[in-house]
Amino acid sequence: MRQARKEGKESRQEISSEWKPATQFRHRSLNGIGAMTQVRIKRVYFEPSEDDGMRILVDRLWPRGLTKEKASVDLWLKEIAPSNELRKWFAHDPGKWEEFQTRYLAELKANGEPLARLKQEAAKGPVTLLYGAKDEEHNEAVVLLKILQKSR
């Protein structure tokens, strides 16, 4: 990794095609036997990797400038993304992060089918949740990862 500088001030670290370390959680399968599954989050713009497992895009909008071939998405689960209203309200403002999480969790609770589908896919094997946002700490994939971790 290298540190980028802009007008003499430090900006965010540029990240190569690597993602943050994998997070694992224990998931109960339908027959009650726990299985260790890897769930990762990664910007869709980073190069696909063999370690990604099933690549699930969790954004409502298709990422700008990416072809389907380049994105290498196995499943586009746009129904799990925040509503257009919530997405526009949040606008990736870190000051709204706590409220965004609360509202997003309420949306997921009101429409549980997409989350159930995500949990089913995660139970099958390694999964990488893909998102397009530049902010790697404040996006819906982070919220979904936390949910999957808690469902151990």
Image: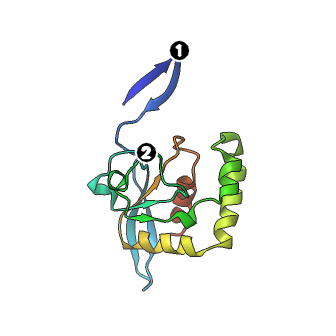
Who's the residue at 55% across and 71% down the image? 114
Q: Position of residue 89 (x, y in %)?
A: 71, 49
Residue with the mark numbered 2: 65
The reply, left or right, for residue 71 in relation to residue 106 is left
Residue in view at x 42 percent, y 86 percent: 31
Instruction: Tell me the quadrant of the picture where the N terminus can be found.
Output: top left
Residue type (three-letter) at the residue carrying disc 1: Glu
Which residue is labeled 1 in the image? 7
Residue 17 visible in the snapshot? yes
**Residue 51's x, y, as percent?**
30, 56
| Placement of 59 over or under 96, stated as above or below | below
Marks 2/1: CA–CA distance: 27 Å
Q: Quadrant of residue 38?
A: bottom left
Q: In this image, 78 relative to 111: left or right? A: left
Which residue is nearer to you in this view: 104 or 63? 63
Q: Amino acid at mark 2?
A: Gly
Could you say which disc has been placed on residue 115 in the image?
none
- Mark 2 packing: few (<14 Cα in 10 Å), some, or many (20+)? few
